[in-house]
Each structure stands twice: as C-alpha cells, then as structure tokens.
Image (spheres, rainbow, N blue to C red):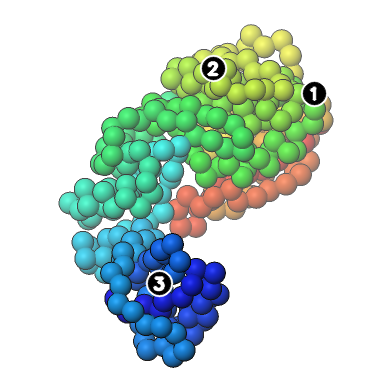
Amino acid sequence: MKCVKVPLKQLNDTRIKLMENGQMNMEYRIKASDDYGYIPINSDVNDYEIVDIELEPMKKVPHNFSELLEGELSREEIENLRTSFDTIGDIVILEIPEDLEDKKQIIGDAALKFTKRKAIYMKKSAIKGTTRVRDLEFLSGVDDSVTIHKEHGARLKLDVREVYFSPRLATERKRVMESVREGEKILDMFCGIGPFPIVIARNKETDITAVDINESAIRYLNENIRLNKLKGSITSYCGDVKQVSQSFNLKFDRIIMNLPGLAYSFLDVAVNLIEDGGIINYYEFSDSYEQGIKRLENACQKAGKKVEIMNCRKVKSTSPGEWHVAIDGKVY
C-alpha cells in the first residue's frame, strides 16, 4: 500500500492536510512505529517520502440498518421494510411486514449486528387484552426477554413478553414529571411496570398510588421501586382500577390515564377521585384533540364539575392520520 512516511511528531498535521486535499486513502488504518507514521494515500503526493507498507483495512461501519441488508434484500424490499424499531434495554423489537416474513431471519441477524444488543424479537400481534401484551417471536441473539431499561436516570426492569412498555414515551414522562409539584398525591390508573411513577418519584417528593390489572407488571413495578432511589413513595395495587379505587379514602391532586385505547371509559372514575383544582393527564388515540376534550368536558359535566384544558399535544404517531394524543385538564 502506498503511504506517506513522516516523523511521528508531524503525523497528525500531515494527516489533516492529506484529508483536506482528498489524498488520504480512508479505507486503511494509519500505522505508527517508534519513530515514524505511515499514512495511506490514493494519489501521488509531492514533497513527502513515499513507501510501500502493508496496512490493516478499516472496518466498514454501516451508517444505517438498511445498508446491512443491501445484497440480501432487493431495493424494493428494503424500502418496504420499516427500519425504525423499539430498543428496550438490551432488547430490540422489530416490525416486519407480512410479505417479508420469509426474510425475517436475515433481517433479525442484520438488526443484531447493527444495534449490538442482546436479543432481537419480532412483533407477531398487536397489543391485546386487558393486560396489554403482544406476541413476540425470537429472531436473533440470546432468547432472554428480561431486561433493564434506563430512562432519565431511572432503571426499569421488565419482561417484554409479559408486560407492555414503550420507550417512545420517555419525553412525555419527563414532561409530566417536570409539571408535578412537590407534595402531590398522584394516582396512575394504568401504571404498567411503573415508568411514570418511578420517573416522578425519583425526582419529586410525592405520594403515588399505582394500579394495574397485569400481575406481572405489578411484580416488576415492585422490583423497580427497590431498584431505584426514590424521593417520593409509591404504593402498588393489582386489579381493575374501577374495583380497586372503591377502597381509596382519599382524593388525588393528579391522575395519570395512559391507556389510550380505553382510558375514556374510566373518566367517570377519575373525575370522582380528583381533588378540586387537580389535574388529569388524559391520553387517547385520535386524529384530533376535539374528541378527547369533549369526553373530558362531558365526564366533568355529569359529575357537576368543570374542566379547564391546560395543554394538548401529540405524543407519537400510531398510524397514518392517527396519534397518541395527550390532554391535560384542571378539574373544578
């Protein structure tokens, strides 16, 4: 390999100059000995000593997931593949179109190589049932579905086969945490493994009641309470919040309702449990905010209360034209 030979003290300046002039061969590594450095070149260079040296090729690093599939899938197949995926701790969950399922192993192996995570799984169903889980198929790596996901300094342990968790709500969880006042009494009606309660309680002195119908989710929530150093307190309950809440003898300053497919059917419970002047963080799937606002207003009206809409936002896209929307309402 043709190289420029320079004293070590001149190596970096020479490297920069050759790169700026487009004369450095970027496919090989620079080699250094005790006294000299050897910089690979791709054209003749004046004013330097040129020597032939055997150099180590640079490892080609793909810039994106699609590049790893070139030569394995056609260009059309790559374009049809959703190359966005959920990374939860050291686990990656892919969404592979039905017409590419015969290439799922190739895609899974490429994802393992690109992400350098422990395990690659593929979605086999939509989220279903009251426990909000989906079927997953193991593709590549180590078939271990338990992981610890880190978010805003919190450690969240979970089994992706047994519970629902979306890393795409990290920004929303931080936003809610930052809006919480010290000393709030909070109810998370559909807490899952506890990402909202844990992130809030790590940062604020609050008293949080966390409810979920999924026994595995509550088990992991209790583990996560132990895993994290919390400023606030979290009390967990397993069951349907409509039944569990009947034993509550207090009202709450804030109620979190992140069950976007069904939260509307629990609004009467939330309105009954909210303190005067308390805030409901309500979520639903919709193409606009109007439906959710109307549902909040109607639930409050039935209870003889009013609601002031403080904020509306799109949390994430769920399908073309539909969003996971958030509506914050102060109830009086």
Q: Quadrant of residue 147?
A: top left
Report if the CB atoms under discs 3 and 1 are less than 8 Å apart.
no
- Answer with mark 3 or mark 2, whichever residue precedes in sequence: 3
Instruction: Give the secondary structure at mark 1.
Output: loop
Callout 1: few (<14), some (14-19), or many (20+) C-alpha neighbours within 10 Å?
A: few
Q: What amino acid does circle 2 point to? A: Asn
> In front: 1, or 85?
1
Name the residue nearer the viewer: 91 or 212: 91
Give amino acid for label 1: Gly
Q: CA distance from mark 3 to mark 1?
A: 64 Å
Q: How far separated are the C-alphas under marks 1 and 2?
A: 21 Å
Q: In the image, which disc is placed on residue 309?
A: none
**Image quarter of the N terminus:** bottom left
> Residue 142 vs residue 313: left or right?
left
Which residue is under mark 2? 222
- Give residue 51's position: percent from left, percent from top: 33, 79
Q: CA distance from mark 3 to mark 2?
A: 58 Å
Q: Which structural element holds mark 2?
A: helix
Circle 1 residue: 183
Residue in the picture at 17% in, 51% down: 102
Q: To which residue does mark 3 refer?
A: 38
Residue 13 seen in the current view: yes
Left/right of residue 275 with respect to residue 131 in the rendered view: right
Q: Residue at x 52, y 45 (%)?
A: 168
In the structure shown, which secondary structural element does the residue marked by tag 3 occupy?
A: strand
- Classify the position of the C terminus by image quarter: top right
